[in-house]
Amino acid sequence: MALSPRLEVRQSQNLTLTPQLMQSIRLLQLSHLELNAFVDAELLRNPLLDRDDASADAGDALPREKDTEIDPYRDVVDHGGRLESAVSIANGFDTDVANVFPEQTGQDSLSQASAWPQGKGGDFGGEAPDLDQFVSSQTNLADHLSEQVGLLIKDPAERLIARNLVDNLDERGYLTTTCAQIAEQLGTDVAHVEAVLEKVQGCDPVGVFARDLAECLAIQLEDKNRLDPMMAGLLRHLDLVASHDFAQLMRATGADREDILDMLAEIRELDPRPGRAFDGAPIQAVVPDVFVRRGNSGAWQIELNSDILPKVLVNRTYYATVSKKTRDQSEKSFLVDCLQTANWLTKSLDQRAQTILKVASEIVKQQDGFFTYGISHLRPMTLKTVASAIDMHESTVSRVTANKYMATPRGLFEMKYFFTTALTSASGGEDHSAEAVRHRIRQLIDAEKPDAILSDDTIADVLKNEQGIEVARRTVAKYREGMNIPSSVVRRRQKKAQMA
């Protein structure tokens, strides 16, 4: 057969991911904080988008005494003008300012000199002062220690070393580098750095600038005058303390069991991470995306958290008004693009909410036993199980459940929590969830007695005999270590120490 070029016309179907489709897929996996940030950016960029704020509508429905705009600047200034100064108040009582306002001494003249202007053309350039500028910031660990270093050390060379030590502290207050590295960096000897380190180790909070846990505890004990040779020997064997090996501790320190228990009681009162008191990172509260409640009929009701869902509207009136007056072709193209983007965003937000509700409803349906009886009835469930039930792709279900939380009568759970692997039943019955097995392992360990500690093999046999769960010893060990539960040997020592 001869080869020759030729033209053919073929018809086929394929899926093309347009930019808007890719953006819609991306919206599914965003958390409510990320979604609100995205919507805020679109509101700034697109003039045809308006926020549908129900609270604003409710505020408009309230009766107003006057149909005039309130000037917040004038309101604040008028209120400030009615306040008396500290001097006038003290004169009214026929006494000195220091007797009435001790903290105001020497400040009243300054406050009068910098009084707020009575009009918008005053010293503030037409604006009242921003009160947020006068709120004190939270002091971090580095600033707290730098103030002490400036008072403690006067020599400029030693102060430079001390500030370098401050810069190399982690959030716990521990020194993350060695004295040799600092000496090499600053061009001095190690003894000089160690001498400065010994000085700054007395700073508040006590225990900072330690190089390890033992040194941190030693600094705090020395501050309390409790660092005797026996206690120092105990700090050198913290690994034996962690394993509760009292026999080795008594031989290593030369102390009896009662002395070791007393020293351990003192160590428990110390702070192993002294720098955490200055950890000012804001705590982000987890806000649920879905609420699960028991209805009056006994069935589970699933409801989206509408308070965290952004609500936007397309301002078609504004579009019609502007498009009539626009003659430039580029401006018309811009308006059409903004209209298409606004329509897409409103449709995508609605589709995202419906998809989350659909997936959450199927999760509640699959895990009805968990919501009714607890974690012991948590069923094994995969993404494919949910995707097949609601006729979606597994990747869509994975994106929907990412960074989403569900508030239930049994607590707040991430939606991915309900997807667990299955463990085969020894009796050939229904498979068991890995999370339910972990819960049962923890129950068995919490209920064990000091003279009857369960080994991993024993736990595996109990699971097989009681619940028909076919699980290997190494699987029990993996689950136990994942829950930060020590081995049977360490648990036996711990429970014996608690009984002593």
Image (cartoon, rainbow, N blue to C red):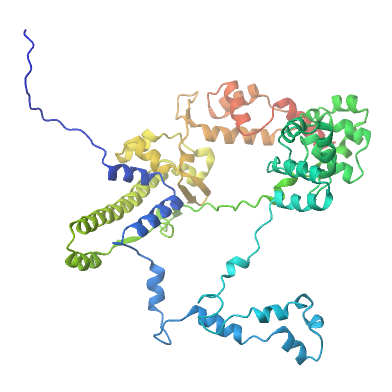
- Quick check: 21 above or below 496? below
Q: How many marks?
A: 0
- Quick check: 425 above or below 117? above
Q: Is residue 91 left or right of residue 302?
A: right
Q: Position of residue 243 (x, y in %)?
A: 77, 29
Q: Is residue 147 left or right of residue 415?
A: right
Location of residue 479 (image quadrant):
top right
Q: Nearer the viewer, residue 347 or 131?
A: 131
- Quadrant holding the C terminus: top right
Residue plotted at (59% across, 53% down): 282
- Quick check: 29 above or below 139? above
Residue plotted at (50% across, 39% down): 377
Q: Is residue 347 visible?
A: yes
Q: Is residue 307 left or right of residue 140?
A: left
Residue plotted at (46% across, 52% down): 33
Q: Position of residue 18 (x, y in %)?
A: 26, 41
Q: Nearer the viewer, residue 268 or 208?
A: 208
Location of residue 62 (image quadrant):
bottom left
- Quadrant holding the N terminus: top left
Residue plotted at (59% across, 21% down): 474
Q: Is residue 265 visible?
A: no
